[in-house]
Every structure is written in structure tokens, then in C-alpha cells.
Amino acid sequence: MQAERGDGVDDGMTVLLAEDDPDVSALVRHVLEADGYRVEAVADGAEALRRFEERRPDLLVLDVMMPRLTGFEVLARLRELDDAGTPVPVLMLSARAGQDDIVRGFELGVSDYVTKPFMIGELRARVRALLARV
């Protein structure tokens, strides 16, 4: 599959991708890089938190089920850090499609929640919409 470059993308935008499935991570990274974003990928929640604290990204794409810290745990800790200023938007990307999980994500402060399997075009549109607000 070849991803086309999206319109109006700011090449300076950075996305931190926290996804432990290497196939999903590679696909999302490829699509976002094709749209002109700089993507840094990590495979576990603790590493996502560490990288976020080192270099605050413009967007965090976060899986729920990851080793060491779940996406929910990462999100809760990040929102504690974001008590001052504008929080970084977080797009939760998860196979956990139950209403309780989705509601929990929004209660913890997620900006958007996309369930797997997902459509590439929809993911790209949601990323663009979130970054347009930054």
C-alpha cells in the first residue's frame, strides 16, 4: 500500500507512536511519515513516558495494551504532568473496542479513540484534525 502525502501538513510536527505490535507500528509510522510528520516509535508504556518527558511531541498515538505500563497508565501520568498549559493531544489506538474502555480513555483525557482494525484514511484524517488544533 502506498500512502499519499496529505494536504496542509506541517513538516515540523512530531508524533510519538507508542505501539507494541511491530506490524501496526510500521504501518502507522509509514503513513504518518508519508504525510510529512516526524515519527518516533516506541514499543512499551514506560519508554513512551520517558520519551514524552524528554521531548514533548505535538501528538501522542497511544496503544492501550502495552508492556510495562498500559496506555491508560501512561495517559493518567501524562495528564498529571500537563496540569499547567495546553495538554498534548492523545489519539488512543486500540483493539479494546468495548464501551467501558473507550469511556475510560475519554475520562482520563484522551483527545480521540480509534479502534483496531482501523481504516488508514480515517486515521490520517483524525491525526490531521488533532494537529490542526495545536
Image (cartoon, helix red, strand yellow):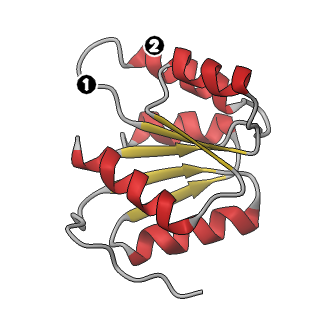
Q: How far apart are the two marked residues, 2 and 1, measured between alpha carbons?
A: 12 Å
Quadrant containing the C terminus is top left
Residue 3 in the image: x percent, y percent? Answer: 47, 82
Residue 119, numbered circle = none
Which amino acid type corresponds to the residue marked 2 in the rendered image?
Glu
Residue 40 in the image: x percent, y percent? Answer: 49, 58
Which one is nearer the viewer's eye here, 134 or 85? 134
Up-down: is 84 above or below 130? above
* Callout in the foreground (2, 1): 1
22 sits left or right of 9 in the view? right
Residue 110 in the image: x percent, y percent? Answer: 49, 28
106 sits left or right of 32 in the view? right
Up-down: is 15 above or below 48? below
133 sits left or right of 105 in the view? left
Residue 86, numbered circle = 1
Residue 104 in the image: x percent, y percent? Answer: 63, 18
Which amino acid type corresponds to the residue marked 1 in the rendered image?
Thr
The mark tally for this picture is 2
Up-down: is 12 above or below 34? above
Q: Residue at x 71, y 57 (%)?
A: 117
Asked whether residue 134 appears in the rendered view, the answer is: no
Asked whether residue 36 appears in the rendered view, the answer is: yes
Which one is nearer the viewer's eye here, 50 or 81? 81
Q: Residue at x 23, y 49 (%)?
A: 132
**Residue designated by label 2:** 80
Residue 23 image-quadrant placement: bottom right
